[in-house]
Amino acid sequence: MKLLLVAGARPNFMKIASIVTALDAHNLSAKKRIDYLLVHTGQHYDEKMSQTFFRELDLPRPAVDLEVGSGTHATQTAEIMKRFEPVLVKERPDAVLLVGDVNSTIACALVASKIAYPGGPDVSDRTRPLIVHVEAGLRSRDRSMPEEINRILTDALSDLLFVTEESAVHNLRSEGIARNRIHLVGNTMVDTLLRHRDRAEQSAVLKRLGLAALNSGNQTTLPYGVVTLHRPGNVDDPAAFRNILDALLSIGKTLPLVFPVHPRTVSRIKEFGLADRCPMLTPHETIPDTNAGLYCIEPLGYLDFLRLMSKARIVLTDSGGIQEETTMLGIPCVTLRNNTERPVTVSEGTNVLAGTSKVAIVRQAIRQLKQRAQRARPRFWDGKTGQRIVKILSKSTLATSKS
Ligand code: UD1
């Protein structure tokens, strides 16, 4: 069996890493190998948004890099499609595996769904690869989010749908997707977190930021919070962004907040003239002794960010994956959105939805800071999701007839 794995943007790399590990383990002993090729679309391309993750997660070098770069949604999606089609025609994989909800995911699903590999002389012999979606079925019910469109369309085109939580099974069933195509297998991002937790403990990030102190020979961590923010709904509108910044600056009066800033957000900070409200620490600067405030830093690698999150008193974020990671780590999370496509992080985990008003964010942060860290483990979030996926894949029917 030949499998083509697609990754394009930062959160894809953690998900693909779990599957690569499981495939390598399978191929060591299985009678039937699953050969795989990794395609990087190049949606994310900066060292700190891409290459760092390949190194830290021991991902193989991509066999193909489509190098699409940034653009409007239409340009980026179309460019990925144009460049992915010849790769499919050349490689003729039996299956294409897609993760998450980024533009790379939907672009490659569309191409794979319409491709027709020539077979025998009969036109009806034409086949296409099986389309496999990992992290299917999540729904925010907010179609102003580009990711929600990507999720709905990718799921509609997929043959095998692997889901992280029960709510996703219900969502897919209510959209008419047959039960036998849906598999509740757990969370590949959690596989990667569990696998790298010990390595992350070696990270020097806390020391580098001046957040670790030596107390009678023992290392202690000063209290701090972590912020991430990059959703277009939060950062592309100056009024909305200012409002969130006001809330963060208010929380930052009593608890230093470390904010690794996404490139999209860096651009908006410059564009909206907000640089004086969120100054960047240079790579060698530590958080000053008078340590309350909001401290922006460059995006961190996987291990540093995992370490930073795991010792934080609180995480304030609009990311999807971080809601799941904080649930696993038992760190209180405040989501700066009105909805979440990952409700299990609220019902079983450490997450609360604060929306985006200043008052609500500050109120929820104060409430969450009173919570004791408590780990939760939703069903199948046990580090074995990649193995479950590979087991099901190894038994599945391969290419799908076009007729
Ligand atoms: C994308 C995903 C989002 C995911 C996020 C994680 C879509 C629709 N959105 O959003 O779901 O949560 O990735 O980061 O696919 N840029 C760089 N260097 C890079 C990549 C991007 O400077 O390596 C800048 C460019 O100015 C670009 C902007 O960031 O225009 C946004 O990048 P883009 O890939 O369009 O979307 P993200 O906001 O990263």
Image (cartoon, rainbow, N blue to C red):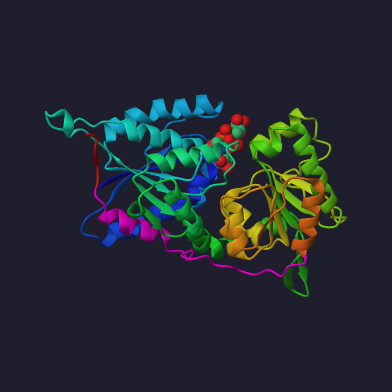
Asked which quadrant contains residue 246, the reply is top right
Q: Position of residue 234 (x, y in %)?
A: 70, 39
| Numbered disc total | 0
| Residue 40 in the image: above or below residue 202 | above
Q: Quadrant of the C terminus?
A: top left
Q: In the rendered view, would you say 200 is above or below 276? A: below
Q: Where does residue 169 sit, x and y in percent of width and height?
A: 45, 55
Residue 336 x/y as whole percent: 70, 48
Give the residue furthest to the bottom: 216
Q: Which residues are magenta?
A: 370-397
Q: Is residue 298 magenta?
A: no
Q: Quadrant of residue 185?
A: bottom left
Q: Residue 374: say if magenta.
A: yes
In terms of depth relative to the viewer, which is nearer, 393 or 181?
Answer: 181
Magenta region's main secondary structure? loop
User: Is residue 201 among the parts visible in the rendering?
Assistant: no
Q: Residue at x 47, y 41 (%)?
A: 152
Identify the residue at the far left of this view.
121
Q: On the rendered structure, is 138 left or right of 84?
A: right
User: Which residue is drawn at the image coordinates 64% and 44% (left, top)?
Assistant: 299
Quadrant of the picture in which ligand 1 is shown:
top right
Q: Report the front residue among 290 and 91.
A: 91
x and y, in percent, of residue 122 in the image = 12, 29
Task: Relative to 357, say whether 218 is above or below.
Answer: below
In this picture, residue 122 sits left or right of residue 400: left
| Residue occupying image coordinates x 78% and y 51% | 360
Say if residue 384 shows up in the picture: yes
Asked whether, in this view, residue 122 is left or right of residue 361, the answer is left
